[in-house]
Amino acid sequence: MFTTFTALALAGGVLRLVLQWQLRKRWGISLGIPQALAGALVVLAGVHEFVKPGPVPVPLGLNLGLLWPDLLWRRA
């Protein structure tokens, strides 16, 4: 059985895959953010509530699923 974290990470990955596919198919563009920003967003989503500088409305699993390609591969 999947945990909530795993389900959210998979949903984020699938959402990113479909969004990337549709953007490339329709307009020929590629979606990507810098690795430093992706890492900062993942760290902010994973920090405990009392340390956060502000609310992060996206759970860690979904955030990690959406930003995983940006964290793994560097684009030129």
Image (cartoon, rainbow, N blue to C red):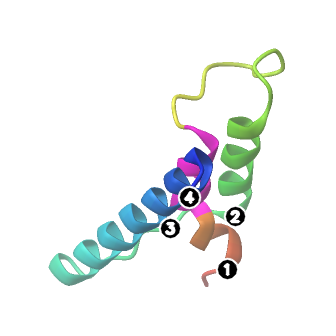
Q: Which residue is mark 3?
A: 32
Q: In the rendered structure, which amino acid carries the disc numbered 3?
A: Gly
Q: Which residue is mark 2?
A: 35
Q: Secondary structure at mark 2?
A: helix
Q: Circles 1 and 4: CB distance less than 8 Å?
A: no
Residue at x 74% of width, y 57% of height:
36
Q: Which residue is mark 4?
A: 1
Q: In the rendered structure, which amino acid carries the disc numbered 4?
A: Met
Q: Circles 4 and 3: CB distance less than 8 Å?
A: no
| Of pointers 1 and 2, the one earlier in the residue sequence | 2
Residue at x 61% of width, y 48% of height:
5
Query: Distance of mark 2 from mark 3, alpha carbons?
Result: 9 Å
Q: Which residue is mark 1?
A: 74
- Tell me which segment is drawn in magenta: 59-67
Between circles 1 and 4, the one closer to the viewer is: 4
Taking 6 as reference, is 55 above or below it?
Answer: above
Taking 8 as reference, is 44 above or below it?
Answer: above
Residue at x 59% of width, y 28% of height:
56
Q: Most prominent secondary structure in the magenta stretch?
A: helix
